[in-house]
Amino acid sequence: MTLSFLLTVFSLGFISSFLSGMLGIGGSIVLYPLLLFVPPVLGFSGFEAHDVTGIGAIQALVSSITGVLAYRQAGFLHKPLILYMGISVLLGGIIGSSISSIFSEWTINVMYALLATTATVMMFLPKKGTENVSLDKLKFSTFTAVNLAFLLGIGAGIVGAGGAFLLVPIMLVILKIPTRVTIASSLAITFLSSIGTTMGKVATGQVLWAPALLIVLASILASPLGATIGKKTNTKSLQMILASLIMATSIKIWFDIFH
């Protein structure tokens, strides 16, 4: 691996981790297409889908925990929500990542595109006003949260993502969680999910450690910076940025699948 290639990987990890901390996503929704498509455009040999999912699992683990630490001081973490959804998505992630090696690269790309498309549609659905609900008065369906988190964990484990790019719209649209609470709590849930996903990827030999460690370094630097900016950004703006980001990623992946 050349120095220029390693610098490219670091830069891509920095961008995805910054957006992770800012928007409450694990970062893989951005990192996945960046690692797949950018290196070949710049003349480097590309990563395989299995390589990207392994690197993405490591990145989601590190960027989510650094983002959580940044949001913890602001008091937006909803502990019961994190507990119920975190345990469910962790179990699902272990299952999904353990079986991911049996799927072809094309199948993984299609699964990723389907998850991103679902998240895109949900982000543009109307959200009833819950932004002013205080943390101690916030209520949600435990049954719905647990089951959706488990299914999401399986899908996220297969594609090597923490799952927060779909977790965020689920929390906003279905569970009616306020935006800032969603962003902070989804990072904590993604951290738990990423533990299971990372365990499965490492156990099945799907992690390239040199690029993964570079992206870990980028995550440590960029995720807290993104979280700081996210806490100061209007909630409607955060939602629109996230929706546009997921939509663009979804379109790009579908385009490459069919072309």
Image (cartoon, grey):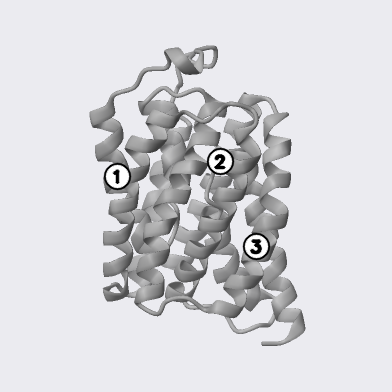
Residue denoted by label 1: 88
For marks 1 and 3 on the same chain, the one whose residue lies earlier in the sequence: 3
Reading the chain from its start, which is encountered first: label 3 or label 2?
Answer: 3
Q: Residue at x 74, y 74 (%)?
A: 7
Q: Which badge, 2 or 1, comes first in the chain's sequence?
A: 2
Picture coordinates of residue 2 (x, y %)? 72, 87
Q: Residue furthest bottom?
A: 1
Image position of 38 with respect to 234: above or below: below
Tell me the amino acid under the disc marked 2: Gly
Residue at disc 2, secondary structure: loop
Assess disc 2: are there few (<14), some (14-19) or many (≥20) residues with their C-alpha within 10 Å of its C-alpha: many
Callout 3 crowding tier (Cα within 10 Å): few <14, some 14–19, many ≥20? many
**Circle 1: is it few (<14), some (14-19), or many (20+) Cα within 10 Å?**
many
- Residue 193 picture location, percent across and down: 40, 51
> CA separation, marks 2 and 1?
18 Å
Residue 110 visible (yes or no): no
The N terminus, quarter of image: bottom right
Looking at the picture, does residue 44 appear above or below residue 52?
A: below
Q: Which residue is mark 2?
A: 24
Residue at left offset 65%, top offset 31%: 73
Q: Nearer the viewer, residue 148 or 146?
A: 146
Q: Amino acid at mark 3?
A: Gly
Tell me if residue 92 comes above or below residue 216 in the rendering.
above
At x 23% / y 30%, what residue is drawn? 143
Q: Secondary structure at mark 3?
A: helix
Q: Which residue is mark 3?
A: 13
The three-letter amino acid code for the residue at tag 1 is Ser
Label 1 vs label 3: CA separation?
A: 27 Å
Q: Are marks 1 and 3 in contact (CB under 8 Å)?
A: no
Q: Secondary structure at mark 1?
A: helix
98 left or right of 211 in image: left
Looking at the image, is mark 1 or mark 3 nearer the viewer? 1
